Image: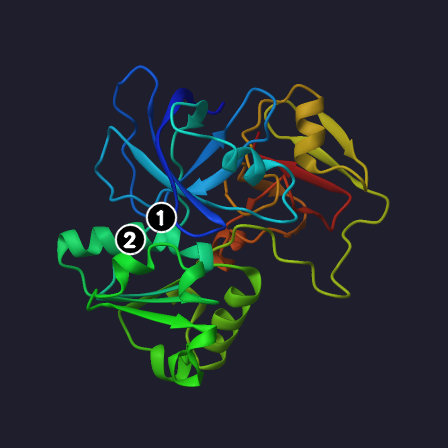
Amino acid sequence: MSTTWTDAVVVARHDATPRIAVFDLARADGGELWEYEPGAHIDVQPGATAPVRQYSLCGPPGLRKQYRIAVLAEPASRGGSRAMHALAEGDALRIAAPRNRFGLAPALRHRLFAGGIGITPLLSMAQALDATGGDYDLHYCARSRAEAAFAADLASHPRVTLHFDDGGPAGRLDLARDLGAPTSGVAVYVCGPGGFMDHVLGQATAMGWPESALHKERFSAAPASAGADQGQPGGFTVRLASTGAEYPVPEDQSVLDVLLANGVEAASSCGQGICGECIVRVLGGEPDHRDDVLTADERAEGLFTPCSSRSNSPILELEL
């Protein structure tokens, strides 16, 4: 279950906006990269001591020699975006095999809504749908044209509508107009900053769109709601079904932290419950779900993210 890494190199870099840098990456040995489907992301580590971060692949799927990612410089960065923006052409880094919890579902039509840097996975989707003749429209929202990466490439595309906050009320996103009432066979995709996603998803739900039609990917965990369940008081115990081993999980550690500290092989990546790499199945107990990646059906099936979620019962048994 360990992550598969390869050494890579920056073969090109340009600044799409003052805060967004676009990187083209290739294998250091010149070999082919992994195949991927639109919506996929990769882990990137820009130096031996740099933090690992996840970035959506925004180039057209099918190019095995080169990946493209775009990175927003975050003022409150924990070090990831700063390390990435320090890279130049020729610099070395390592990347992991793509993962995808945000792929295109079969649908008669796809409705894509991007906010800011959230354009990255949706751009790959649009390119794939263009290549296959899929029916879709893309709404791309940003504070201004100067802050919208890829705006110049998309401005004349017949399926793309650009929305800028500084463009006046008529040019801003209007979900009653741009999304409308629920339609059978339509899949809606949303990616961007938390406030943008909460607005689009909240409005879509209010208009009657079912959860099954709404697909989302966050770049950071949504804040816990006020008064949210705090889980089992004083911590709980996690049990491994394969061995019966039990480990206490204190209030200040995650299930994943405890598993790794005790030498249990467990996949992990984001540590925030947004990428899905660590998902396991609960066989006993009552999980306290705190992720932003699993659907209601997946939670009902017993899936669980040990990096972020906890337990409402004294013992939680995992399929490990």
Residue 125 vs residue 317: left or right? left
- Local packing at callout 1 (Cα closer than 10 Å; few below 14, some 14-19, many 20+) is many
- Disc number placed over residue 125 in the picture, else none: 2
* Residue 115 visible at all: no
Residue 37 at least partly seen: yes
The residue drawn where x is 39% and y is 72% is 163
Rendered location of residue 320, percent (x, y): 57, 29
Q: Earlier in the sequence, mark 1 or mark 2?
A: 1
User: Which residue is label 1 attached to?
Assistant: 39
Q: At which x and y percent is residue 75?
A: 63, 49
231 relative position to 203: left or right:
right
Mark 2 element type: helix
The kind of residue tagged 2 is Met
Between 66 and 152, the one lying in front of the other is 152
Query: Dividing the picture into quarters, in which one does residue 61 lie?
Result: top left
As displayed, is residue 45 above or below residue 309?
A: above
Cα gap from disc 1 to disc 2, whole angstroms: 6 Å
